[in-house]
Image (cartoon, helix red, strand yellow):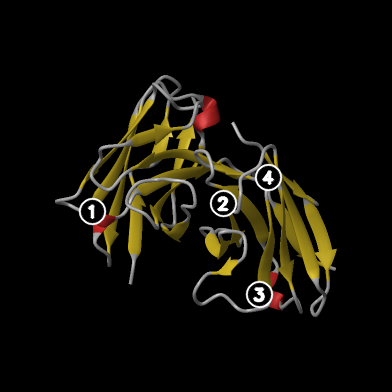
Amino acid sequence: EVQLLESGGGLVQPGGSLRLSCAASGFTFRSYAMTWVRQAPGKGLEWVSSISGNSGSTYYADSVKGRFTISRDNSKNTLSLQMNSLRAEDTAIYYCAKDVVVVPAAGDWFDSWGQGTLVTVSS
Amino acid sequence: DIQMTQSPSSLSASVGDRVTIACRASQSISSYLNWYQQKPGKAPKVLIYAASSLQSGVPSRFSGSGSGTDFTLTINTLQPEDFATYYCQQTYNQVSFGGGTKVEIK
């Protein structure tokens, strides 16, 4: 059974940094791209970032480009999101999701999701 | 960027009803359109991928259709557990989601 467990969320001041992690199990981690999706309180889903199975390709939404960095450690089955220069509008539940392909491409979808970790950016 | 527009944003329906949710892309996305269901406090769950393919384990009362810019999610014989928010997602060019459609009990 695929399991994704996010951690690292919390309260941070504007301009601060936070590192999220997602521990994966139940599948061959290196064989699948992974993605972060966020959801602001009471709002819809927003794609944040994706990374290919071998970390060779990374993708970012314009709203986080230059501030967030996605990475993965295939030896530890762990996905990470380093978030810098945080803003109030980054406040959201952050979900990690498993892609169905090894490199994000047209036709991809997300077949497993974690339960999310809440990030609150406020002074 | 490809914009995804869902309609309606919310609807009220009764158990046993047939429900249809529309999703329109700002440009052609071929059939690279997926549908997710999200219940309060839970993570999203994929229902339909590639516009019309039913994800394993999803009840057959859910169906999807469309291609190009216009897509539809249909729920036949609405069940109590189907009251949720539904999102469309395109993966033709990067990833973007529609704004969601909340299906509420009438």
Give, as a three-letter code, the residue at label 1. Arg
In the rendering, at what x and y percent does residue A40 appear? 57, 40
- In the rendered image, which residue does mark 4 sit on? B99
Viewer-nearest of labels 4 and 2? 2
Give, as a three-letter code, the residue at label 2. Tyr
The quadrant of the image that shows the N terminus of chain B is top right
Q: Is residue A76 left or right of residue B51?
A: left
Disc 4 to disc 2, how far (Cα)? 17 Å
Give, as a three-letter code, the residue at label 4. Gly
- In the rendered image, which residue does mark 3 sit on? B81
Viewer-nearest of labels 1 and 3? 1
Q: Is residue B81 left or right of residue A33?
A: right
Q: Mark 2 lies on which chain?
A: B
Q: In which quarter of the image is residue A25?
A: bottom left
Residue under the image location 34 percent in, 47 percent down: A103
- In the rendered image, which residue does mark 1 sit on? A30
- In the rendered image, which residue does mark 2 sit on? B32
